[in-house]
Image (cartoon, rainbow, N blue to C red):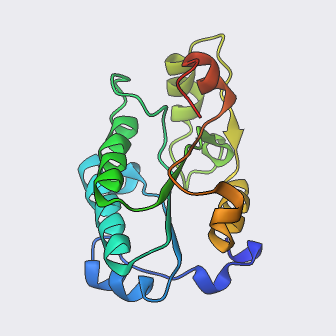
């Protein structure tokens, strides 16, 4: 995000510490929030995301961008996807202007051990999608390139209200139900 001209918006905060978040969000217009359940566990991930959202609402943030994984539907059997739905529900309850950006799979997941174990991409994802449904890959840097302009001038880029950005495989898998 720094390389895309939003350096003044990139601040460090502890997602487990609401006071830290309040300080970080002071005078901010937007928030980009993503958590990793492989680091914190699913329950802690939900708590962190909800804490960030609640702190953003308290701070009067103009727009909240949340990057949940998965297809946005219950019943997948994938806990790290379904946990995001609890957070999305909280965003709606808070009335926080938000956008859901659903990166399906990060390219770095294939070979960067700093992310998920590679087994997730080479074995788990193909089992979930099946042999005929391609997986759309995106780099972490490209996600930053998508989010940064929106945080700079959100209403011009996306308008008002929540939107869901989902990849073509999901559009084919769940026709007529995605935006």
At x 58% / y 37%, what residue is drawn? Answer: 104
Q: Quadrant of residue 111?
A: top right
Q: Position of residue 97 (x, y in %)?
A: 46, 61
Q: Position of residue 52 (x, y in %)?
A: 35, 68
At x 66% / y 10%, what residue is drawn? Answer: 132
Q: Position of residue 45 (x, y in %)?
A: 32, 54
Closer to us: 59 or 83: 59
At x 58% / y 33%, what residue is drawn? Answer: 121
Residue 109 appearing in the image: yes
In the image, taking residue 86 as reference, residue 125 lies left or right, namely right
User: Relative to 48, is 79 above or below?
Assistant: above
In the image, taking residue 14 as reference, residue 12 lies left or right, namely right
Quadrant for the C terminus in the image: top right
Q: Position of residue 44 (x, y in %)?
A: 26, 56
At x 56% / y 57%, what residue is drawn? Answer: 160
Closer to us: 61 or 155: 155
User: Relative to 125, is 36 above or below?
Assistant: below
Residue 141 appearing in the image: no
């Amino acid at each position: 995000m720094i390389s895309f001209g939003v350096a003044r918006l990139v601040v460090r905060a502890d997602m487990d510490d609401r006071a830290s978040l309040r300080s970080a969000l002071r005078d901010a217009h937007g928030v980009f929030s993503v958590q990793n359940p492989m680091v914190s566990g699913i329950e802690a991930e939900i708590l962190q995301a909800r804490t960030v959202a609640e702190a953003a609402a308290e701070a009067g943030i103009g727009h909240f961008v949340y990057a949940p994984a998965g297809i946005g539907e219950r019943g997948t059997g994938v806990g790290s996807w379904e946990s995001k739905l609890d957070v999305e529900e909280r965003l709606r309850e808070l009335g926080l202007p938000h956008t859901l950006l659903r990166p399906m799979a990060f390219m770095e997941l294939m070979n960067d051990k700093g992310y998920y174990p590679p087994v997730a991409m080479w074995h788990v994802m193909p089992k979930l999608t099946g042999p005929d449904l391609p997986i759309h890959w995106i780099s972490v840097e490209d996600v930053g390139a998508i989010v940064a302009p929106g945080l700079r001038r959100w209403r011009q880029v996306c308008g008002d209200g929540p939107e869901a950005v989902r990849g073509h495989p999901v559009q084919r898998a769940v026709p007529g139900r995605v935006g």
